[in-house]
Image (cartoon, rainbow, N blue to C red):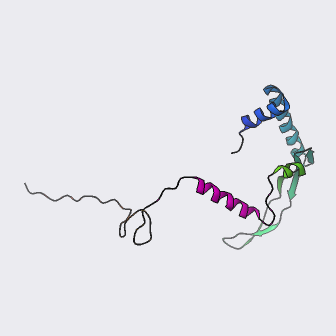
Amino acid sequence: MPYSEAQFKNLVAEYGEFTKPQVNDFFNALKEAVRHVVGNADRASIPGVGRINCTVRESRMARNPRTGEPVKTKPKVGVRLSTAKSVKDAVPSIKKGRTLIEAREATKKRRSTSRTKTTATSTSNGRRGRPKGSTNKKKTATRSKSKF
């Protein structure tokens, strides 16, 4: 489960033995410093955390997918964050020979077997939960015309 901003600030205050106002001041200063770096299209390194790079994508000729006519795109500016090696090393490792996708699937299987399963009724046509020939439409009663 990801940490909320308040939870993360509390964690930093606990690890660093800071007060909450000091942690808030630190994060506000960090935010302003990052804005300054990005505003000047520079790069900065936060030791032990990662690197911030400002990237510029030049304008280019593209195609409108609907009509196929060439269109000139605007130049774009983006921000890239790359993590430091110490952060990457902190991520739990995967056993040799297993890809990340295989590890995720194995984790999902373990989680699904540990939970209680609900069983649905199987019908003769292979669908679950409703008998053969039924529809999702509500049936309404028809009125018979009475003569007075």
Residue visible at 16% across and 59% down in the picture: 144
Tally of numbered discs: 0
In the image, is residue 10 above or below residue 38?
above
Of 148 and 58, the residue lying toward us: 148
Q: In this view, does 66 lie to the left or right of 23?
A: left
Of 38 and 58, the residue lying toward us: 38
Residue 143, quarter of the rendered image: bottom left
Q: x, y (%) of residue 32?
A: 85, 37
Is residue 99 highlighted in magenta? yes
Magenta residues, start to end: 92-120
Of 90 and 75, the residue lying toward us: 90
Q: x, y (%) of residue 17?
A: 84, 28
Q: x, y (%) of residue 81?
A: 84, 51
Q: In this view, does 77 lie to the left or right of 108?
A: right
Q: In this view, does 115 lie to the left or right of 46?
A: left
Q: x, y (%) of residue 62?
A: 77, 69
Residue visible at 81% across and 56% down in the picture: 93
